[in-house]
Amino acid sequence: MDLPVIDLAPYLSVAVEANGDADVMTVSSELGELCKQVSQILKETGALLVKDPRCTVEDNDRFLDMMEKYFERPKEFKLLQERPDLHYQVGVTPEGVEVPRSLVDEEMQGKLKAMPKEFQPSLPTGPDPKWRYMWRVGPRPLNTRFQELNSEPVIPEGFPEWKDTMDSWGYKMISAIEVVAEMAAIGFGLPKDAFTSLMKQGPHLLAPTGSDLAHHGQEGTVFAGYHYDLNFLTIHGRSRFPGLNIWLRNGQKVEVKVPVGCLLIQTGKQIEWLTAGDCIAGMHEVVVTTRTINAIKLASEQNRSLWRVSSTLFAHIASDAVLKPLGCFAESPLASKYPPICAGEFVEQELGVINLKGNKGGS
């Protein structure tokens, strides 16, 4: 099954005409249908492919090229950017640190065993053998109950283009998420800014992973064990190596194919909270598949990097905002399963489970 692709250009052109004024912006019936389609796809699949004219293939390539160079550097060099004392919320997280939820959550393990064999995820045997880099994107609140770790961003030596490349790609992907969040809100019958107003000054993280296919390129290797993301929405640029599997709401397992020029958006736990489970956090894993093996062979022949870099950004609800079912969702019979909680508290609880205890983060 191929996921449908939504072109954001028609919505963007109307938003530009309205100059960002929510009261001026009128949504035509055609655009309203597109918004309903976005909300429906997020609800039914937990994943959405989009085209955003502001996010180009060249932007993604520039980012991937730099991150490949970084991850190819020796381990000793990368460990200079490690900040375990800051709970890995800035800088690099080495392989073997992050623990997939499916390894420690007994309730989840029970559900996995009950799945039909062909839809079961690959069970990890230990922590994820992937590296990750955490880079915060966007402004931060001056006053917050959740004092951010007062740490400067970590910039590796020898990468003069680092800050510009990270910030540029990070802001573009957040812009795409904001449009999808507005369209989903309209599709759900909520005010246009129901989600985006809660995202303002959120602890958004550009968090690319690096998986060494030269050393861990055997079919069946689990780079990211079966899990959901704890944030609001996650967005990925296209990776140069396939391997991402997602689970639809009906339990079906799908290997994702992201077309060139498209971005993949996945639902996280925070949107599940805000919609009282109408959208649920999408389950996914990253595993070396037959398609990955074929891509490794081709990259080897072409003398390209064998590091699989994910172009991933975690968009968050602001830490001091309260997560609770919004609008019509507050009347849902499931609303009581989603009691009000500060987004920052929620994130802290979730990070504790996956061995990244800290104030902020993605998953």
Image (cartoon, rainbow, N blue to C red):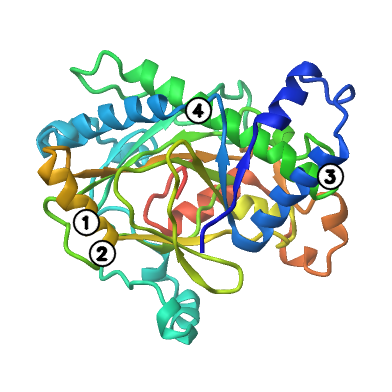
* Cα distance in 3D space between marks 2 and 1: 6 Å
The quadrant where residue 21 appears: top right
- Identify the secondary structure beneath mark 2: helix
Give the mark nearest the N terminus, 2 or 4: 4
Return the residue nearer the eye: 82 or 137.
137
Mark 4 or mark 1, earlier in chain: 4
Where 251 falls versus 2 (above or below)? below
Residue position marked by numbered label 2 in the rendering: 290
Q: Amino acid at mark 4?
A: Cys
The mark found on residue 190 in the picture is 3
Element carrying mark 3 = loop
Q: Which residue is mark 4?
A: 55
x%, y% of residue 90?
37, 33
Q: Nearer the viewer, mark 3 or mark 4?
A: 4
Q: In the rendered structure, which disc, 3 or 4, sits on the residue that comes first in sequence?
A: 4
Callout 2 amino acid: Thr
Q: Few, some or many C-alpha atoms within 10 Å of disc 3 (few <14, some 14-19, many ≥20)?
A: some
Please tell me in which quadrant of the rendered image residue 196 appears: top right
